[in-house]
Amino acid sequence: KEAYTAGQVIKGVLCVLGPDERIKPVIFHKGKAIEAEPASVLDHLSPGDILLKGANALDHEGNVGVLMASPVGGTMGQFYLAMKARGLEIIYPVGLEKMIPSVELAAQFGGTLALGKTIGARVGMVCVADGVPFTEIDAIESIFDVEAVHFASGGWGGAEGCVTLAVDGPDADVKKCIKFIEQKIKGEPPLPAAKSPCKTCGLPCSFQGKDLKQLPGYLK
């Protein structure tokens, strides 16, 4: 799982996993994974095809924010306009811990050429107002006949970045939901930190080209 990423927030900084260390986007055709370059499938898409794209921010209006370190926009630059031109759907799986007050406001800041001093990589953000976010609430409500509410956020001692949900529904469905979370979700170990060496990274960043011994303690 830790290799299924490109841009990432890791060890307290914005960063990018090197292309040789990451897993390519997975393409499914009729329920089966196929070997193909993502860009090669664009001309073969048809109504009903969907792109799943991770996100970095979400607000109460449903706006989705995606950070971009690539000067050409990364996955968003490659696929967003092509999907929109074809009228195809993009779903953004995003955790509720990424809720911010306003994605529209945040997207007015940043930019690889606009930012000055940063701790980590320089990035821009795109605000997607017509995307389909898919959060933990959507996941729970799609599996169980319950209504889920974002109840609280945050914690410590291993619960950093967590969200607390309240669910309401028939007793039997609530019990099934709680049992599923206790048995399948609780206790899942955190992903190991997969970070490329700053020394060989070409990304515009405050740590670019530095040896391990030159990095601050929190990045070692």
Image (tube, rainbow, N blue to C red):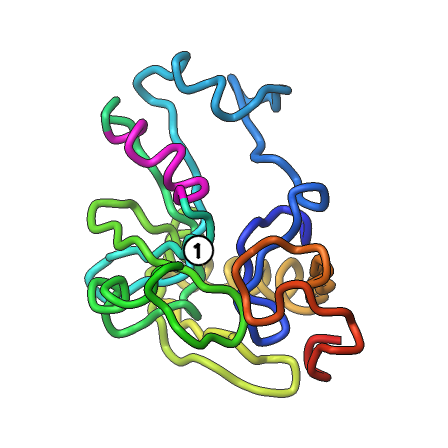
Q: Position of residue 35 (x, y in %)?
A: 64, 20
User: Furthest residue to the bottom?
Assistant: 156
Q: Position of residue 60 (x, y in %)?
A: 23, 66
Residue under the point 61% across and 35% down: 24
* Quadrant in the picture for the C terminus: bottom right
Q: Quadrant of residue 210?
A: bottom right
Task: Name the secondary structure under disc 1.
Answer: helix
Residue under the point 52% across and 18% down: 29
Between residue 55 and residue 179, name the one nearer to us.
Answer: 55
Whether 187 is among the magenta residues is: no
In this image, 140 relative to 120: left or right? left
**Mark 1 crowdedness (10 Å alpha carbons): few <14, some 14-19, many ≥20:** some
Whether 79 is among the magenta residues is: yes
Q: Which residues are magenta?
A: 72-84
Query: Which residue lies under the disc numbered 1?
Result: 140
Q: Quadrant of residue 130?
A: top left
Q: Is residue 33 above or below residue 165?
A: above
Q: Is residue 212 above or below residue 90?
A: below
Q: Quadrant of residue 188?
A: bottom right
Q: Position of residue 114 (x, y in %)?
A: 33, 64
